[in-house]
Amino acid sequence: MKYYASKNTKITDETANKYGKALEKIQIRCNGMLTPDEVVHSAKHASHPLHNHFQWDDSIAAHNFRKTQARRLMRIIVVRSEGSEGVVDMPAFTSVKMSTQQDGEVKTIRVYMPEASIRSDADLHMQTVQDALKRIEFWKERYGHLVELQPIFDAIGEVKAVTVTA
């Protein structure tokens, strides 16, 4: 089997094929059950094809994991709003791109802002809508082969058409 990199990834198809074959070997060795623990365990050996994909400096890996935990924390906190449909949970904080001045240079960074601030800023709101559409498109690419979901994909296309022209 030949493996390829999914869209919007930083690895080449050649690297994806190498990684896919390595993952397949691990899966076979583990009776068809591929787990993250087994992948990391196998990749520990410097000669393993997956080794360079991982950060092996524990202090850097620990810091990066804590940032992942912080992102997850900011994503799981919600605020409740009473509307015509009843009580609705909304994200308390949403990730947006912002430009900032650092060392005399303009840089774009991701920050988390209160949903109310985003709704009151037309540019941030549209950025959030576009981000949501990108995520939906990713979901569609991931599960597009499931014909049972075709009505949802059709509805997504209709919403995208209206949003792009708005």
Image (cartoon, rainbow, N blue to C red):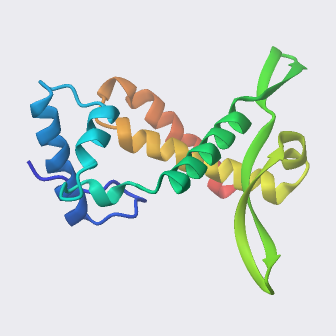
The image shows residue 91 at horizontal and vertical percentages of 76, 33
The image shows residue 21 at horizontal and vertical percentages of 14, 49
Res. 132 visible in picture: no
Residue shown at the point (79%, 83%) measured from the top left:
103
| Residue at the far top in the pictured view | 86
Query: Which of the 4 quarters of the picture holds residue 165?
Result: bottom right
Q: Nearer the viewer, residue 131 or 147?
A: 131
Q: Please identify the quadrant where the C terminus is shown.
A: bottom right
Q: Nearer the viewer, residue 155 or 22?
A: 22
Residue shown at the point (82%, 77%) measured from the top left:
101
Above or below — where is 148 with respect to 118? above
| Residue at the far bottom in the pictured view | 104
Q: Nearer the viewer, residue 137 or 32?
A: 32
Query: Which of the 4 quarters of the picture holds residue 28?
Result: top left
In the picture, measured across the screen, residue 134 lies left or right of residue 77, that is left
The image shows residue 13 at horizontal and vertical percentages of 24, 63
Residue shown at the point (28%, 66%) measured from the top left:
12
In the picture, measured across the screen, residue 60 lies left or right of residue 110, that is left
The image shows residue 11 at horizontal and vertical percentages of 33, 63
Residue shown at the point (54%, 45%) measured from the top left:
135
